[in-house]
Amino acid sequence: MPEVTMLRGKTKGQKVSRFERDSDYSSSEYADLVKMYEGTLGEITEHEIVKGRVVQINDDEVSIDIGFKSEGVLPRNEFNNIEDLKPGDEVEVYLEKVEDSDGKLILSRKRADFMRIWERIVKAYETQDVLKAKVTRRIKGGLVVDLLGVEAFLPGSQVDVRPVRDFDALINREMDVRVVKINHPNENVVVSHKVLLEENLAGQREEILAKLEKGLVLEGVVKAITDFGVFVDLGGVDGLVHITDLSWGRVNHPSEVVKLDETIQVVVLDFDEERRRISLGLKQLTPHPWEAIDQKLQVGQRLTGKVVSLTDYGAFVELERGIEGLIHISEMSWTQHIKHPSQMVSLGQMVDVQVLNIDKDEKKISLGMKQLDPDPWDALLQKYPVGSIHTGVVRNLANFGVFVELEPGVDGLVHISDLSWTKKLRHPGEMVKKGQDLQVLILGIDAAQRRISLGHKQVTPNPWEEFTDEYRVGSETEGKIVRIIDKGVVVELPHGVDGFVPTSQLAFAPVKSIASFFRVGDNLPLKVIEFDKEAKKIVLSVVEALKAKGAEAQEEYYRLHPVPQSAPAGVAEIVPPADPDIEEHPAPAAEEPAAPAPAQAEAPQADAAPEQTEHSEPVHAEAHHEEGGEHANG
């Protein structure tokens, strides 16, 4: 046959049509040769799957003839069944490119396999068929599965109808899936296992909802735990067990009662058909613990319980699930003054208690701790008989008196009126200090009210018996001003007893401002004008004392206390000498001389408010009646 030389083969639409023709060929012979050669070439399109024939297999490559002018060469590792492959076998390959930069035919067996699988996946997506997938690894947001040899993504939210606790436990597990999304440009596939479960549960859900009624007992699995309760999967439909319906006892968090994925029995409490909300209960499956409270507890019984709550007024103790009692702070100690229960107990502590009272209607139990020990107050009358003298420690001061500790936990009150026979105290702090030792006499014990009345002045004899003679009406004495008040001055007399000088008895003329002419610490000549032993009151007068003294003594008095005035009837007018250090206050011209006050001047009331001046000490109320009852002015 004459030699024919082919110049170049073409793809579809570009057929071989040019040959170098020898002069020996006639036109008819040339046409027959061209027709014969074109019959050996098929039409080929890039990026399609084509069939080819294995021509040769060597150690590294496999040659494939796809009916083109040249053969394609593929690596051996692209064939999964290379051991079974032999020359002459027909295989499918993917035509990536007719010619590369070197003029070679580019084929791919792997791409051909992928395209066939991709076609199956796309068809399954269109028909919603169920496919098998195997979990290969875990990634962020979900799992990677092997779907017919192609990697697909299974989101974590599409694995199950219940939250998945451990994704790693699913690795290498096979599961049925449905293709829910395909991204053709990126060749990504998203699958779901949850949609299949929901379809299977749909019928079961409708069946459960149809038979739901209050009181129905169902079995479910704990799906989720929150601060306010537990969600239970009843088989396609969820219900909520509120934290208050988990147990008859106190529950701080639902996890104390149930665990995730735990199978439990619950009872239907309510069902909202419109919202499809199911309220469930767990504690309602057991009897209420208070139903048999009479058989469980009796007044006087001693028990051990757990402190579950602390309040300002006491501690709640759990005796058993659903049964709690209150220990009031007043029932914690016989002797200590408990301000908060944390001084005696702490949360979670196991304590011994005694049942004091049971109120079945209100479901309340009163408990006590101090009742476990003997009441020390029962022995106080023997230990501290009335009239006995003891030494205690001043623990606290109040306006109305002093609290003295006789022994740890045993305090008594010394009223302010029982601190001194002779002093008119405005506050106990004028006489005693916190922490000092103080001798006291037991005045009385009230075991029921837990009160001990004490006295300090009673430790010494009452000096007012002696004062009857020494400070009888008309007797003269001297006193030092210790306090200035509105109605006069309080003076300290010999033996430390306090007396009172009314304003009208300080001078012959009215004294409008005591602090302008008298100061604390000034000594005054005095005469007793009233003495009351029972009321422990001594009222004195400077005016009466001056009347009995000479003019020289009067002049000296008015030099020290230059009160503007005129002499009384029968007494020479006294003109105080000028004192450069004291400003003179001339008396008004039209003012008549004042008559001396009567001998029995009225003493100031005990509660008179003292006048505060720059020369006087800080002044408080004359008497305090905080505890009821007026204290004596002694």
Image (cartoon, helix red, strand yellow):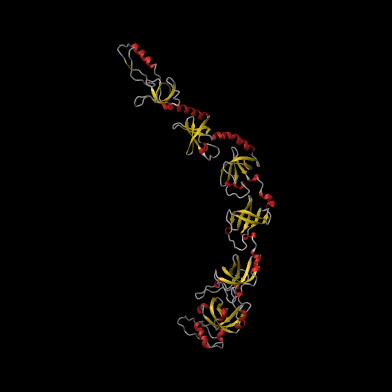
- Residue extending furthest toward the left: 23
Q: Nearer the viewer, residue 334 or 312?
A: 334
Q: Which of 84 and 592 is in front in this view?
A: 84
The percent position of residue 7, horizontal first and vertical second, equals: 33, 19
Give the quarter of the figure containing the N terminus: top left
Quadrant hosting residue 76: top left
Q: How many marks?
A: 0
Quadrant hosting residue 610: bottom right
The percent position of residue 273, horizontal first and vertical second, equals: 62, 40
The percent position of residue 252, horizontal first and vertical second, equals: 58, 49
Whether residue 279 is visible here, answered yes or no, is yes
Whether residue 595 is visible here, answered yes or no, is no
Q: Nearer the viewer, residue 545 or 283?
A: 283
Give the quarter of the figure containing the C terminus: bottom right
Q: Is residue 136 left or right of residue 410?
A: left
- Residue extending furthest toward the right: 295
Q: In this view, does 22 lie above or below 535?
A: above
Q: Residue at x 55, y 39 (%)?
A: 162
The percent position of residue 316, horizontal first and vertical second, equals: 61, 55
Q: In this view, does 601 lie above or below 39?
A: below
Q: Which of 282 and 298 is in front in this view?
A: 298
Quadrant hosting residue 510: bottom right
